[in-house]
Amino acid sequence: MKLFVDPLQTVTSLFRSPPKKIGLAPGSLIHVGEKKMEQPIFSYLDYSEDFFKSETDVSLDTCLQLKNHATVSWINLDGVHDVSQVDAFGKAFDLHSLTLEDILNTNHAPKFEEFEHSALIIMKMFFFDEQTHQVWAEQISLVLTAENVLTFQEQTGDVFNEVRLRLERKSGRIRQRGPDYLAYALLDSVVDSYFHVLEKIGDRLDYLETELISRPTQELLQQVHQLKGQLIYLRKAVWPMRELIGNLMHSESPLIADSTNIFLRDLYDHGVQALDTVENFRDTASGLVDLYVSSVSQRMNEVMQVLTIMASIFIPLTFIAGIYGMNFELMPELKWHYGYPMAWGLMISCALGMLWFFKRKKWF
C-alpha cells in the first residue's frame, strides 16, 4: 500500500516536516513519517562485466561484506522507520550524520548534496492507482560512493524492475560502467515513472472533458479539483527534481565520471519535459473548471429558451381566453353558434404561427 496523496492537504504541506524538539544537535537521528512495514529488509545486487549476484532479505553483516569489493554493489534497505538499522548501516559505510538525518525525514524535498566521500540524492517516486484515480507517492534516498550505490525506501515496491533486469541479463552498457552510471539509471527510472503517471492523468483529463461537455455535475467538478491538487503536488516534486539533475550534471565530484555527464544532460531534458507537461496539464485542469461553468450556463440557457418560447406562445392564448372569458351580456360572438370553435381556431393559429416564426428565426 502506497502513501495516498490527499490534494487538499498536500498543497500547503507537501514537504513541510513536523517540528522537531528545540535544541537538538545537527544530525540527530529521528524518523519523520509513517511506519509502512513491520521489519526492514536488506537486499543487494553485486556485479561486474562478467559477474552478477542478487540476494533479498539478507542481514546487514552480509551487506557489509560488499563494502570494499572490486565489483559494483547496489544495496537497498526497505523500511527506514528503524532508526537503529539506518544508523548502523550508515556508520558501516561511513555516511555523514546529516545524510542519515535527511534519509530518515521522509517529508524531505528532492535534493542533491555532496559530502567528502559520498553524495546524497533524495527524490519522490509516484504511482497511479487505476481504481481510485489517485496519485501515490514514496520517498527514495540514494547515496553514491566510489564503490557502491545505497538506496533507502519507505517500503517494498519501486520503479526499478527494468534496471534489475538489465543488470541480470547484462543488457547494454550498465554492467560495464561504475556506480555513477547505476545511479543515473535509477534516476532515469524515476523520471520515466513521472511520464507514466502523467499519461494516466492526461487520459483522466480527456475523460473529464468529455463528461463535462455532455453532463456537467458537481461530482465531476469535485474530481477536477482533486486532479488539480494532485498536479500541484506533482509540480512541487518535479520542479526541484529538475534542479537536482542540473546540480548533479554540473557537479565536480570525483564520484561522477565525465562519460556519465552526457546521459545526465539527456535526463535533465526529460526533467524539463516532465515539468512542462505538468504545467500544461495544470492549465488544462483550470480550463476544465471554465468548461464546467460554460456547460452549466449553456444548459441553463437552453432551459430558459424553452421556457421563454412556451411563455411567449401562451401570452396571446391567455389574452384571447381572457377576452372571451369576460361576463358581459352584450358581448359579440357570445351567442354565435360557431363562437367556441372560432376561439379555438384563433388560439391554435396564433400558437402555430408563433412556432413557425421562432423556427424561421432559428431560436430553437
Image: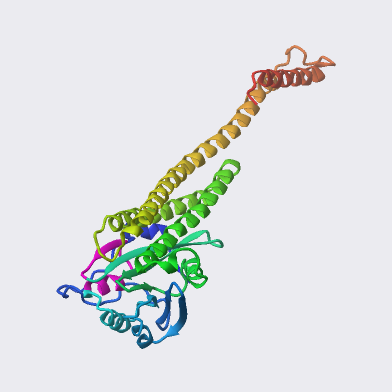
User: In x, y percent, where is residue 58?
Assistant: 42, 85
In the figure, 53 relative to 265: above or below?
Answer: below
Q: Horizontal placement of 357 versus 172: left or right?
A: right
Q: Quadrant of the C terminus?
A: top right
User: In x, y percent, where is residue 342?
Assistant: 80, 17
Residue most extreme to the left: 23
Q: Nearer the viewer, residue 144 or 91?
A: 144
What's drawn in magenta, residue-wise? 98-116
Q: Horizontal placement of 50 versus 72: left or right?
A: right
Q: Residue at x 41, y 48 (%)?
A: 273
Q: Nearer the viewer, residue 20 or 147?
A: 147
Residue most extreme to the right: 337
How is the structure coloured here? rainbow
Q: Quadrant of residue 189?
A: bottom left
Q: Horizontal placement of 350 versus 122: left or right?
A: right
Q: Residue at x 28, y 81 (%)?
A: 87
Residue 273 colored magenta? Answer: no
User: In x, y percent, where is residue 253?
Assistant: 25, 63
Q: Total of numbered circles in the picture?
A: 0
In the figure, 131 relative to 92: above or below?
Answer: above
Q: Quadrant of residue 82?
A: bottom left
Residue most extreme to the front: 50
In the figure, 40 relative to 219: above or below?
Answer: below
User: In x, y percent, where is residue 191?
Assistant: 42, 58
Q: Nearer the viewer, residue 80 or 118?
A: 118
Q: Horizontal placement of 210 versus 144: left or right?
A: right
Q: Residue at x 55, y 34 (%)?
A: 298
In the figure, 81 relative to 243: above or below?
Answer: below
Q: Residue at x 56, y 62 (%)?
A: 131
